[in-house]
Image (cartoon, helix red, strand yellow):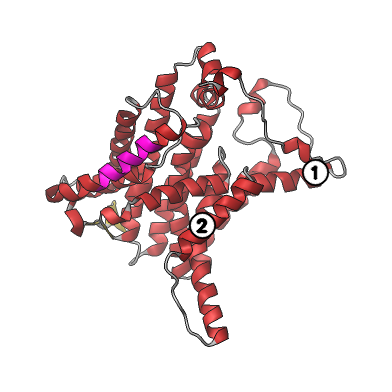
């Protein structure tokens, strides 16, 4: 069991809590750098997809996990980032190093525009508003055919940085390292957000808007900022998704994608960076596990591989329900409980992680 003695308030906002943190996360970064050297092209592609989904998960996590604002429409901002990145490169001739951050800014601006009229909405009403925006963006993509390509979609250009090409198919290793670099930058930005006054304002709004207002937090500004930062990071994810897929249209960013993103952060663990990565692993690896299991069962029974329509969505739904019922803290929450059990054994008690059931009367009557 590791005992940490806090001698300063600065301890709570350190990026690295102790030497063990630095060691394990350093080893994790070294393993991530070695992925193209250790695995084949297929697994490199799966690792790249996991990192891209993790970026999107962190974007949604800022809004849902840190600021407590529900969203069922983040696929719309994936689409905004994806189309903006491609149009900026193809139509305006901007290099990737400029087009990618601009795509994130455009997506973030769209998120702020959504936050302004919905600042007073809560819960299911906010979720319905974001859902309507997601459906509206699909129609806009189809109607704006001269710009977006309509139903036919667009082809993402090959990334070129200082004469070096980063193509998923021609150079999967280089493309993986590019996505890894963006992921690390987003993680550092997220970590610094959490230890900033803005991050603490998000947490105050999430826990109790009445109390946050009493402490001087501008609720509308905090929500708009949360939407802007969340959708900006989601836009970066969408831009990388476009390059990963190569070809995309409105069907790449449907309501199912929004629900999948929300399930990802809930299953991974709300309010944690680790939860975004764990949830992304479920989203990326579960379809492959279903395919392998189906082929194995088919070969074992001699019936061949049979595709069951809706099987993947059904399994996602069952997993989500099970986590909500039995482990609302998600995969990372289960890991924390397991680690705490071994750290405190035999003094560990389940009541340490019991969910809080008492709320402010003002919050209950809202």
Nearest to the observer: residue 171 or residue 294: 294
Residue extending farthest to the right is: 346
Estimate how packed mark 2 is, as few (under 14), some (14 to 19) or many (20 or more) residues with alpha carbons within 10 Å.
Answer: some
Look at 31% across and 38% down and name the residue there: 107
Q: Earlier in the sequence, mark 1 or mark 2?
A: 2
Residue furthest to the left: 146
Please tell me whether the stretch drawn in magenta is mainly helix, strand or loop: helix
Per the image, label 2 sits on a secondary structure element best described as: helix
Residue 55 in view in this figure = no
Quarter occupied by the N terminus:
top right
Give neighbour class at mark 1: few <14, some 14-19, many 20+ (Cα, 10 Å): few
Query: Element at badge 1?
Result: helix
Q: Which residues are magenta?
A: 128-138
Horizontal relation, residue 310 to residue 6: left or right: left
Residue 343, labelled with which disc?
1
Residue 237 location, x and y as percent? 38, 47
Q: Is residue 212 visible?
A: yes
Which residue is labeled 2 in the image?
A: 316
Residue, far bottom: 302
**CB contact under 8 Å: marks 1 and 2:** no
């Amino acid at each position: 069991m590791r005992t940490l003695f806090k001698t300063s308030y600065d301890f709570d906002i350190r990026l690295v809590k102790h030497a063990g943190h630095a060691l394990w996360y350093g080893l994790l970064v070294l393993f991530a750098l070695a992925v193209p050297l250790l695995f084949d092209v297929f697994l490199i592609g799966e690792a790249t997809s996991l990192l891209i989904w993790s970026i999107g998960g962190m974007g949604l996590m800022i809004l849902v996990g840190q600021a407590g604002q529900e969203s069922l429409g983040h696929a719309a901002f994936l689409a905004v980032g994806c189309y903006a990145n491609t149009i900026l490169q193809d139509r305006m001739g901007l290099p990737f190093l400029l087009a990618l951050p601009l795509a994130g800014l455009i997506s973030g601006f769209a998120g702020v525009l959504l936050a302004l009229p919905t600042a007073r909405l809560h819960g299911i009403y906010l979720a319905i508003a974001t859902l309507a925006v997601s459906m509206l963006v699909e129609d806009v993509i189809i109607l704006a055919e001269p710009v977006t390509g309509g139903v036919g979609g667009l082809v993402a250009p090959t990334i070129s940085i200082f004469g070096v090409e980063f193509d998923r198919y021609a150079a999967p290793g280089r493309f993986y390292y590019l996505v890894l670099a963006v992921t690390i930058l987003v993680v550092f930005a997220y970590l610094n957000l959490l230890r900033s006054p803005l991050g603490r304002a998000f947490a105050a709004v999430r826990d109790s808007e009445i109390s946050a207002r009493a402490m001087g937090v501008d609720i509308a500004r905090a929500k708009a900022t949360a939407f802007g930062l969340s959708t900006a990071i989601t836009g970066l994810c969408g831009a990388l998704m476009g390059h990963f897929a190569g070809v995309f249209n409105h069907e790449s960013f449907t309501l199912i994608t929004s629900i999948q993103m929300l399930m990802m952060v809930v299953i991974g663990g709300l309010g944690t960076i680790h939860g975004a990565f764990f949830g992304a692993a479920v989203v990326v690896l579960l379809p492959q596990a279903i395919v392998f299991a189906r082929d194995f069962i088919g070969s074992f029974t001699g019936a061949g591989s049979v595709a069951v329509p809706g099987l993947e969505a059904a399994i996602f739904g069952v997993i989500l329900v099970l986590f909500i019922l039995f482990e609302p803290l998600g995969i990372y929450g289960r890991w924390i409980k397991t680690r705490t059990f071994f750290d405190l054994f035999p003094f560990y008690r389940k009541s340490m992680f019991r969910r809080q059931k008492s709320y402010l009367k003002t919050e209950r009557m809202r």
